[in-house]
């Protein structure tokens, strides 16, 4: 079962792939994963609080899995309806 956080992170990766390319998407995923790991380890961060922690952990899992196998999130013809910022 895919959580809402996991689905949203996949959508974010897909948007970055389409908008900025693979290298930029990878850099963003690596950077954001690192920030999220640090955030849940910091007691004064909201990410470490029970209400938010599960969502941050789900995001970290998605990022790690994508870094290991980037092909699991790939743009397709059906993704043409994703909005990109102007």
Image (cartoon, helix red, strand yellow):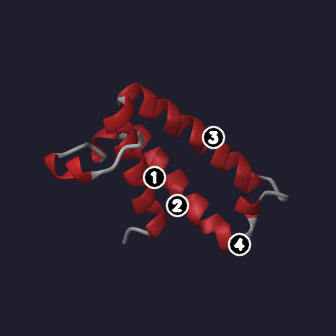
Q: What residue is pinned by disc 3?
A: 34
Residue in the image at 43% along x and 59% along y = 8
Residue 21's x, y, as percent?
35, 29
Asked whether, in this view, residue 34 is left or right of residue 28, the answer is right
Within-10-Å neighbours for mark 3: few <14, some 14–19, many 20+: few
* Among the two numbered marks 3 and 4 on one chain, the one whose residue lies closer to the N terminus: 3
Q: Which mark is residue 58?
A: 2
Q: Which mark is residue 62?
A: 1
In this view, the residue in front, 32 or 41, is: 32
In this view, the residue in front, 36 or 82, is: 82
* Among the two numbered marks 3 and 2 on one chain, the one whose residue lies closer to the N terminus: 3
Q: What residue is pinned by disc 4?
A: 50
Which structural element holds mark 4?
helix
Tell me: residue 66, above or below residue 54: above
Residue sitting farthest toward the front: 86
Tell me: residue 55, above or below residue 59: below
Within-10-Å neighbours for mark 1: few <14, some 14–19, many 20+: many
* Among the two numbered marks 1 and 4 on one chain, the one whose residue lies closer to the N terminus: 4
Residue 47's x, y, as percent?
70, 60
Q: CA distance from mark 2 to mark 1?
A: 6 Å
Within-10-Å neighbours for mark 4: few <14, some 14–19, many 20+: few
Within-10-Å neighbours for mark 2: few <14, some 14–19, many 20+: some
Asked whether, in this view, residue 66 is left or right of residue 50, the answer is left
Which structural element holds mark 3?
helix
* Among the two numbered marks 1 and 3 on one chain, the one whose residue lies closer to the N terminus: 3
Residue in the image at 50% along x and 30% along y = 27
Tell me: residue 60, above or below residue 69: below
User: On the rendered image, what quadrant is the N terminus found in?
Assistant: bottom left
Q: CA distance from mark 1 to mark 4?
A: 19 Å
Task: Tell me, yes or no, whether the two marked residues, 2 and 1, touch with CB atoms within 8 Å.
Answer: yes
Task: Tell me, yes or no, whether the two marked residues, 2 and 4, touch with CB atoms within 8 Å.
Answer: no
Task: Tell me, yes or no, whether the two marked residues, 3 and 2, touch with CB atoms within 8 Å.
Answer: no
């Amino acid at each position: 079962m895919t959580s809402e956080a996991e689905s949203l992170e996949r959508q974010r990766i897909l948007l970055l792939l389409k908008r900025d390319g693979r290298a930029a998407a990878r850099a963003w995923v690596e950077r954001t994963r690192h920030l999220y790991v640090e955030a849940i380890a910091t007691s004064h961060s909201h990410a470490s609080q029970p209400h938010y922690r599960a969502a941050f952990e789900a995001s970290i899992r998605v990022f790690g899995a994508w870094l290991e196998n980037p092909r699991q999130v790939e743009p397709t013809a059906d993704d043409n309806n994703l909005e990109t910022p102007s």
